Image (cartoon, rainbow, N blue to C red):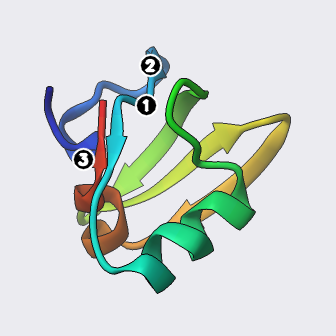
Amino acid sequence: MMPLTMADVGENITIKKIGGKDETKKFLETLGFVVGGVVTVVTEINGNMIVNVKDSRVAISKEMANKIQV
């Protein structure tokens, strides 16, 4: 496993684990980041990422991306 921040742009990856506090997990879940879900990194700027998740584009900070294990 590795944090989402290590994933390559354009790669389809499966979420294996979501870390952090309960409110962080819940927040990511509402955005569509769930264990077993597939995300694609669209772009990455200074560690902040734009990803495709469940047919939506979502921007997340480096801190949030580091909590998502793929």
In which quarter of the view is residue 69 placed?
A: top left
* Kind of residue indicated by mark 1: Ile
* Kind of residue indicated by mark 3: Thr
Front position among marks 1 and 2: 1
Q: Mark 2 and mark 3 in contact (Cβ < 8 Å)?
A: no
Q: Return the residue nearer the eye: 43 or 34.
A: 34
Q: Mark 3 and mark 1 in contact (Cβ < 8 Å)?
A: no
The residue singled out by tag 2 in the image is: 13
Would you place residue 15 above or below residue 59 in this image?
above
Spatial CA distance of label 1 from label 2 is 7 Å
- 20 horizontally vs 23: left or right: left
The residue singled out by tag 3 in the image is: 5
- Residue 65: give x, y in percent of width and height: 34, 58
Q: Earlier in the sequence, mark 3 or mark 2?
A: 3
- 3 horizontally vs 33: left or right: left
Q: In this view, which residue lies farthest toward the front?
A: 22
Spatial CA distance of label 3 from label 2 is 12 Å
In which quarter of the view is residue 70 placed?
A: top left
Please rate how many residues cluster around mark 1, counting C-alpha atoms within 10 Å: few if below 14, some from 14 to 19, many from 20.
many
The residue singled out by tag 1 in the image is: 15
- Residue 68: give x, y in percent of width and height: 33, 50
Residue beneath the point at 43% across and 31% down: 15
* Kind of residue indicated by mark 2: Ile
- 17 horizontally vs 22: left or right: left
Which mark is on residue 33?
none
Query: Considering the numbered disc 3 on the image, is that residue within a helix, a strand or a loop?
Result: helix
Q: Mark 2 and mark 1 in contact (Cβ < 8 Å)?
A: yes
In which quarter of the view is residue 67 placed?
A: bottom left
Would you place residue 14 above or below residue 4 in this image?
above
Residue beneath the point at 14% across and 33% down: 2
Please rate how many residues cluster around mark 2, counting C-alpha atoms within 10 Å: few if below 14, some from 14 to 19, many from 20.
some
